[in-house]
Amino acid sequence: MADQHAQDVKLPDPVELSRAMTRIAEQSQRLVAEFLSRQAHDGAAAPSASPDPLNIGGAFLEMTAKMMADPMRLMQAQMSLWNDYMTLWQRTTQRLLGGEETEPVITPAKDDRRFRDSAWDENTLFDYIKQSYLLSARFLQSTVRGVEGLDEKTRRKVDFYTRQFVDAMAPSNFVLTNPEVLRTTLESGGDNLVKGLEHLLEDLDRGKGRLAIKMTDYDAFKVGVNVAVSPGKVVFQNELIQLIQYSPTTEQVNKRPLLIVPPWINKFYILDLRPKNSFIKWAVDQGNTVFLISWVNPDERLATRTWEDYMEDGILAAVDAVLKATGEPSLNIIGYCIGGTLLASTLAYLHATGGTEKIASATYFTTMTDFSEAGELSVFIDEEQLTALEERMEEKGYLDASAMATTFNMLRANDLIWSFVVNNYLLGKEPFPFDLLYWNSDSTRMPAAMHSFYLRNMYQRNLLIKPGGIVLKGVPIDLRTIKTPTVMISTREDHIAPWKSTYALTQQLAGPVKFILGASGHIAGIVNPPEANKYGYWTNTKLPADPEEWLETAKQTPGSWWPEWSKWLQKYAGGKVPARDPAAGLLKPIEDAPGSYVAARVS
């Protein structure tokens, strides 16, 4: 029997809809007038920009030329689409005439949450709209992917932006073709749309004319109060970093301290969101003296800071401070994402200049060193886009945090853009308080010199994997010289650091290497505490050159990889010593954790 909601969703009553729309128009006119008045008062204006800074038009022009060179293939695709539409129409007609239930021509992917409302299946009209959209989307994407003769970069760009268009045109994103929105509009007399417009204008206001979609209740969280709450002290700082030493929870600790180098593209507290899923707390509970780098959120004063500076004033300064604080000659170290890329660069530099005895072992979380297959982020890396990006950074001396956030959100547009458009603007709801989305919105800036070096030398030219390709402080570095014992943690569904690309480092290092492949993605696959008993991971005693061959013979284990990593780390723990209190160490505490650097929120 059809769900009551599905029964209620029919074509809207024109009189009722007209009244609602009239009321919406009247209130909207007032809201828009107030918004425009504020913008004029504040002097806000949209920045000038190239009409096509991403060179999307050029990519699609090339794709169209290649497509038209093979009209038969295009004709076959169109005929296939026509046949699918005819089948859909026949089955829809059969349902409308009261016939037996028919099999759908096409169904959404299991993880597609846009069509969860029961009316999408149980109401014939909306089922037809849904399937028509899915058929058209499949046709567009398969046709684009089937074009021959495109270079790989152009192919990826066209495929990516075709998907962006397809996602944007989903019927779930429009009032009259989303059954839940339509039902809510009629039931509330349009209050949801008026409230949604208020949300839209508030987001434009907060973004100073740019749409800054609110993903969570920003007032529900505060760094150091209900996120990033592991106790400790800031024991060292310079212009780029604060170094946090966390308070012990065990009477005895491993003699060798542990230093964590998080990414500076996002803030470190993804590893310390809540006590129950905090990697930092868990590592402390395992008997480690944990230190962590908290990167500064840079402004124009740090515009000229380079990759070398992040190595020297970041990792190397932190290593020296940790060893001074503990009186130990060496430590274990973790690098996460770009923090791991910097760690690999630093270890290669140390192997060329001396000082490797300070690092007993290295752990890499989802770390790219070979960027030849960089996943969907490579869509944003070509000469036209890099030049446009560098021109933007030159104006302020840094890349706006919002630009980085938009890039990463586009990689999962349905989850991180369009779901909020529907919830906030069409349904008029407030976003749900969610600590992970609060962290996701707490973005960081990138110094112009460092970011340009990273994008050009890693993503565009892929020089880090090439011996002598990168020169740091006048020293050519070579990853093949690194003898430090290493464990690598990658995740199978990572769209930022694809695991097969991260695996390449296993073939480069000169020292012993262990590779662990976790399930899920770049964040959830890393922040996976044992108590959750989720996902699973793969291990293999062999390291063949082909990552697929590695996976075929790997052993799968349920649950979190954290204990597997901790077991490996014990080999380099150096025995036990009494717990170290950061308030009574050899470095004078500056302030309580999480420190002031991480608390700075910028646009």
Image (cartoon, rainbow, N blue to C red):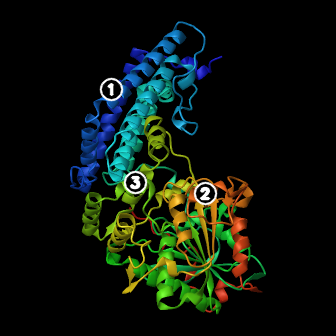
Q: Nearer the viewer, mark 2 or mark 1?
A: 2
On residue 75, the disc is: 1
Q: Is residue 473 visible?
A: no
Residue assigned mark 3: 406
Q: Is residue 493 visible?
A: yes
Type of amino acid at the residue the image marks with label 2: Glu
Q: Nearer the viewer, mark 1 or mark 3?
A: 1
Residue 501 in the figure: left or right of residue 73: right
Q: Residue 461 occupies which quadrant of the picture?
A: bottom left
Give residue 389's position: percent from left, percent from top: 29, 62
Q: In the figure, 321 relative to 417: above or below?
A: below
Residue assigned mark 2: 549
Crowd class of label 1 (few under 14; some 14 to 19; many from 20; radius 10 Å): few
Crowd class of label 3 (few under 14; some 14 to 19; many from 20; radius 10 Å): some
Crowd class of label 2 (few under 14; some 14 to 19; many from 20; radius 10 Å): few
Q: How many marks are shown on the rendered structure?
A: 3
Type of amino acid at the residue the image marks with label 3: Thr
Where is the C terminus found, in terms of image quarters?
Answer: bottom left
Q: CA distance from mark 2 to mark 1?
A: 39 Å
Whether label 1 touches label 3, CB < 8 Å: no
Q: Nearer the viewer, mark 3 or mark 2?
A: 2
Residue under the point 57% across and 20% down:
103
Give residue 290's position: percent from left, percent from top: 64, 78
Type of amino acid at the residue the image marks with label 1: Met
Camera-nearest residue between 389 and 275: 389
Camera-nearest residue between 554 and 598: 554
Whether label 2 touches label 1, CB < 8 Å: no
Camera-nearest residue between 122 and 33: 122
Mark closer to the chain start, 2 or 1: 1
Q: Secondary structure at mark 1?
A: helix
Residue under the point 72% across and 66% down:
564
Q: Residue 136 occupies which quadrant of the picture?
A: top left
